[in-house]
Image (spheres, grey):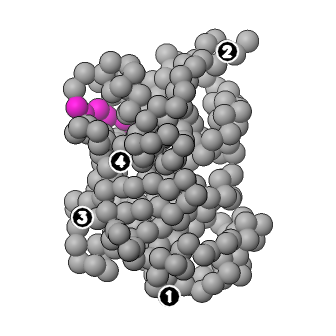
Amino acid sequence: MIIPIYQVDAFTDRLFLGNPAAVCPLDFWPSDDILQNIAAENNLPETAFFKKRDNLFEIRWFTPFAEVELCGHATLASAYVLFNHLNYNGDHLTFDSVYSGKLEVYKKGEYLTLDFPADTIEPTLPPDHLFKSMGSKPLEIWKGKTDYLLYYPSQEDIEEIKPDFNLLRKIEARGIIVTAPGYDCDFVSRFFAPLIGVNEDPVTGSAHTTLVPFWAHRLNQLKFKARQLSARGGFLKCQLTGDRVLISGKACTYMIGSITLT
């Protein structure tokens, strides 16, 4: 079996920045073990697999350790591959995911826009180990469907966080989002997910389904410019539209190859 593979840097227009994702178009679905082993071998934050079905594309996402319910940057990377390498016609396509339903992607110029379901968040109490693992106490703690969101007063607070990942791994959540107002954007964030094998994700599209409703309420606005302050960094444009979040970004291709399974 030979599977094409594309490696794409998402939420950036320059190589070696943004969030790298592997994208594997499929003719049929191999076993879950094969999908997980490919993702582990790639050792990237996410590997996306998709297969055409009628007028849409079934999609799944895997970290090196686990399948996840939703991934923004690997969905953006998959759409980029379809539009730029697989001759997909038009400026709109639909992915269908097991856990998050249908996900629309729109192309306008160099930007691709993800149409994702908005998260529902509520204030919550800190789980055990949270403050110690982060090294500082946030002003507020919120909980969404899969992640905790910690609100801090300044961008410097976000830049200076050095998590204890061994402790953070004990918290039962997909990940921890930390956020604060930004200097040259509406808000900044970082995302830590050691429980699923990604200590710090470079740019996390799906985290913005939580961040955007939070900041929409706080700033009383619907459109945002956002930066994720990882070492690689990334830039996103976001908009809240009812119970959906539009997440826009650019991407660029790093590598094209093939996987041979014998």
Q: Which residues are magenta?
A: 91-98
**Looking at the image, is 260 positioned above or below residue 183?**
above
Element type at marker 1? loop
Query: Would you name the residue on which mark 3 appears?
Result: 223
Q: Amino acid at mark 2?
A: Thr
> Do callouts 3 and 1 mark residues in contact (Cβ within 8 Å)?
no
Element type at marker 2? strand
Q: Earlier in the sequence, mark 3 or mark 1?
A: 1
Provide residue 4's location: percent of width, then percent of height.
54, 19
Within 10 Å of the Cα at label 4, are there few (<14), some (14-19), or many (20+) other Cα atoms? many
Q: CA distance from mark 3 to mark 1?
A: 24 Å
Query: Would you name the residue on which mark 4 appears?
Result: 249
Within 10 Å of the Cα at label 3, are there few (<14), some (14-19), or many (20+) other Cα atoms? some
Provide residue 111's location: percent of width, then percent of height.
29, 42
Element type at marker 4? strand
Magenta portion: prevailing SS class = strand
- Residue at figure coordinates x 48%, y 67% from the top left: 189
Q: CA distance from mark 4 to mark 3?
A: 14 Å
Q: Nearer the viewer, residue 172 or 177?
A: 177
| Left or right: 126, with 205 as reference point | right
Provide residue 103's location: percent of width, then percent of height.
34, 42
